[in-house]
Image (cartoon, grey):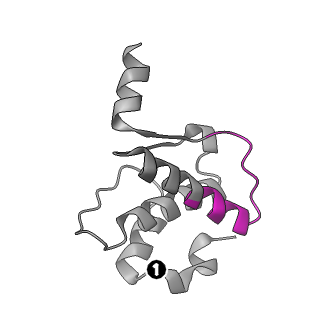
């Protein structure tokens, strides 16, 4: 099922465009409280739901451990609401943790 159909009322037009973008990188520039994390989590869930990526192919980066946990929770919740089990772990991490892991 398309995440855009199921959650259409939760995204505005610009957010829906970003979530629907399937290929290539995407730059989101917006102010605080504008829904950047929502767009990112919905886009990740949509990529998985549409079969464009598996959970273990996802790398989502944030700044704090609190936001890392929140982002991962939101993505898993969206996937469960779509009936998609998540067996593989996404790599949702902080910049610092990724740098430490890569340089080790």
Give the vertical position of 46 relative to 11 (above or below). above
In percent of width and height, residue 91 lies at: 53, 38
Q: Residue furthest front?
A: 66
Give the vertical position of 1 relative to 63 (above or below). below
In percent of width and height, residue 37 lies at: 40, 62
**Image quarter (top left, top right, bottom left or bottom right) of the N terminus:** bottom right
In percent of width and height, residue 30 lies at: 24, 68
Q: Residue furthest top?
A: 104
> Looking at the image, how many numbered discs can be counted on the residues?
1
User: Which residue does the image show at 61% across and 38% down from the upper left?
Assistant: 56
Relative to 81, is 47 on the left or the right?
left
The residue to which callout 1 is attached is 11
Relative to 87, is 40 on the left or the right?
left
Few, some or many residues within 10 Å of mark 1 (<14, 14–19, 20+): some
Residue range highlighted in magenta: 74-89
Give the vertical position of 82 relative to 63 (above or below). below
Q: For residue 80: magenta? A: yes
Q: Out of 40 and 65, give the one closest to the viewer.
A: 65
Q: Residue furthest bottom?
A: 9
In percent of width and height, residue 36 lies at: 35, 65
Relative to 18, is 1 on the left or the right?
right
Please tell me in which quadrant of the rendered image residue 98 appears: top left
Please tell me in which quadrant of the rendered image residue 38 appears: bottom left
Q: For residue 33: magenta? A: no
User: Which residue does the image show at 44% across and 75% down from the upper left?
Assistant: 16
Q: Secondary structure at mark 1?
A: loop
User: Which residue does the image show at 42% across and 13% down from the upper left?
Assistant: 104
């Amino acid at each position: 099922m398309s995440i855009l159909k199921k959650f259409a009322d939760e995204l505005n037009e610009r957010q829906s465009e970003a979530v629907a973008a399937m290929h290539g990188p995407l730059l989101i520039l917006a102010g605080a409280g504008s829904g950047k994390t929502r767009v990112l989590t919905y886009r990740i869930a949509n990529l998985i739901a549409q079969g464009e990526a598996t959970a273990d192919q996802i790398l989502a980066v944030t700044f704090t451990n609190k936001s890392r946990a929140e982002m991962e929770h939101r993505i898993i919740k969206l996937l469960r609401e779509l009936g998609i089990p998540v067996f593989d772990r996404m790599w949702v991490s902080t910049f610092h943790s990724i740098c430490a892991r890569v340089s080790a």
